Image (cartoon, grey):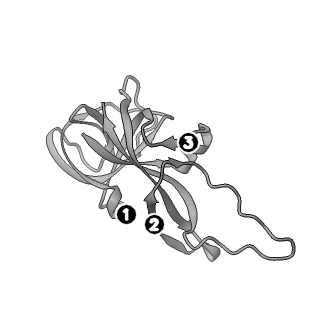
């Protein structure tokens, strides 16, 4: 199974990572349903999974329901909007990280088959920008700072801020 998955900029930066095609990653996966936040089309996946309710834990989102989704060898954490158990179909975005999960929650291992940078975020005056998914790349890492010419104001990047990588992860 191949899953489109966002790896946020803070995960790549804090871990000193670069994400490359062919790399093997091991991380926790989380799902946010499509109806909660605007997500670019390439990030959205429809899953047919088996849902298992989890007990409360400190990282759970207040007012939501910790749930494990089992789908084709992958275990995905979901703060579900209501209690759910058994067969489910859900659309949303998957995010990979290595920071925190319920105790004993399994990480997913996979091979990166495709890499694209994600741009967007906030612009001058705190106006939100649309999220833009870039072209295929061999490697995604924080872009180097733009060259600044003395006495000339740097132009903002038309794509916005670098937000991380969108990868296609083939689950092992």
Which label sits in the foreground, 3 or 2?
Answer: 3
Q: Secondary structure at mark 1?
A: loop
**Residue shown at 63% from the left, 76% from the top:** 125
> In this picture, is 2 found above or below 120?
above
**Is residue 146 or residue 30 the one in the foreground?**
146
- Determine the CA span between mark 1 and mark 3: 22 Å
- Determine the CA span between mark 1 and mark 2: 7 Å
From the image, tell me which residue sits under label 3.
Answer: 18
Q: Quadrant of residue 48?
A: top left
Rate crowding at label 3 as few (under 14), some (14 to 19) or many (20 or more) other CA atoms within 10 Å: some
> In this picture, is 2 found above or below 26?
below
Whether residues under marks 1 and 3 lie with C-beta atoms below 8 angstroms apart, the answer is no
Please, which residue is most extreme toward the right here?
151
Q: Which of pointers 1 and 3 lies earlier in the amino acid sequence?
A: 3
**Residue shown at 50% from the left, 42% from the top:** 19
Residue 143: x percent and y percent?
A: 62, 55
From the image, tell me which residue sits under label 1.
Answer: 40
Q: Secondary structure at mark 2?
A: strand
Q: Which of pointers 3 and 2 lies earlier in the amino acid sequence?
A: 3
Residue 132: numbered disc: 2
**Residue shown at 28% from the left, 43% from the top:** 2
Residue 111: x percent and y percent?
A: 37, 36
């Amino acid at each position: 199974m191949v899953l489109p998955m966002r790896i946020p900029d803070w995960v790549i930066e804090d871990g000193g990572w670069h994400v490359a095609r062919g790399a093997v990653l091991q991380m926790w996966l989380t799902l946010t349903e499509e109806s909660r936040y605007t997500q670019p089309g390439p990030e959205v996946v429809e899953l047919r999974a088996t849902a298992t309710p989890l007990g409360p834990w400190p990282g759970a989102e207040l007012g939501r329901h910790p749930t494990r989704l089992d789908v084709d060898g992958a275990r995905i954490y979901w703060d579900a909007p209501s209690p759910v158990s058994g067969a489910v179909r859900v659309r949303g975005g998957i995010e990979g990280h290595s920071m925190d999960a319920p105790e004993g929650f399994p990480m997913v291992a996979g091979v990166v088959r495709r890499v694209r940078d994600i741009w967007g975020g906030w612009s001058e005056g705190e106006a939100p920008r649309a999220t833009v998914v870039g072209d295929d790349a061999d490697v995604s890492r924080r872009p180097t700072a733009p060259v600044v010419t003395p006495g000339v104001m740097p132009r903002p990047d038309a794509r916005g801020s670098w937000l991380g990588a969108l990868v296609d992860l083939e689950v092992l």
